[in-house]
Image (cartoon, rainbow, N blue to C red):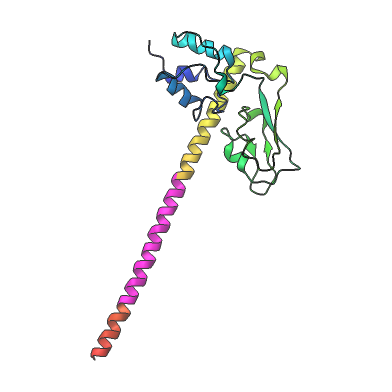
Amino acid sequence: MIVSIDAIDALLPQTQCTKCGYQDCYDYAKAITNGEKHNRCPPGGQQGADALAKLLQREKLTLDQSCGTHAPKKVAWINEDLCIGCTKCILACPVDAIMGAKKLMHTVINEECTGCDLCVEPCPMDCIEMHELPLEAQPQTLTDTQYEAQKAHYRSRHNKRAIRLKQQKESETKKHQQNIRLSNMNIDKKAYIEQALANFKAKKKMD
């Protein structure tokens, strides 16, 4: 039985936390189609691992504790009094859930935060904490429709961020190449002028 990457990805919580060892949920789903174990997603918990086993028609596996333990969902919180506006957390967030600019206070958009905690470690001021959500906001309390909508929203934000970063990188590469061309043009222009002057002086001596 062949199961698509999208079908596997649809069962993952879209936390984009990288705890599974892969860059994002989609990459983990892709790895599973290539034989990776289906029990490496702590946010999905044992229930998620069992759902994947059923989809894949594989044996059930206990959640791999080396990837982390399943815990109630949390969201990041920034102590704004300590924040120095370094933007490290903004760069780390896989779904662009942190607002702010360089040397300005940052803040987390709770509704967009997946709880991945990737922003915690890079913070040089240790001013980011993970706060547990109330029971009514936990995944197991949401209706199936609400949970699927939440996952789709997280996936969409992550994909949009990936597109933005790709375009930004392409723009930077293009700008760098343009700068190189301009630099070469200036060098060629300088060399042309120097050669012209040398030719003029040589001709003048001959006269």
> Residue shown at 33%/71% (left/top)?
191
* Residue at the (69%, 46%) spot, across then down: 84
Q: Residue furthest bottom?
A: 207
Q: Is residue 132 above or below residue 47?
A: below
- Taking the magenta stretch, the answer to whether it contains residue 184 is yes
Rendering coords of residue 106 (x, y %): 68, 41
Query: On the picture, is 191 further left or further right than 23?
Result: left
Q: Quadrant of residue 43?
A: top right
In magenta stretch: residue 41: no
Q: Identify the image quadrant of residue 63.
A: top right
Residue 97: image quadrant is top right
- Residue at 63% x, 29% y: name it: 113
Q: Quadrant of the N terminus?
A: top left
**Residue 197 in the figure: left or right of residue 150:** left
Q: Quadrant of the C terminus?
A: bottom left
Segment tinted magenta in the rendering? 170-195
Whether 199 is drawn above or below 80: the answer is below
Query: Where residue 40 sits in the image (x, y, percent)?
Result: 52, 20
Query: In front: 54, or 166?
Result: 54
Residue 147 percent coordinates (x, y): 60, 17
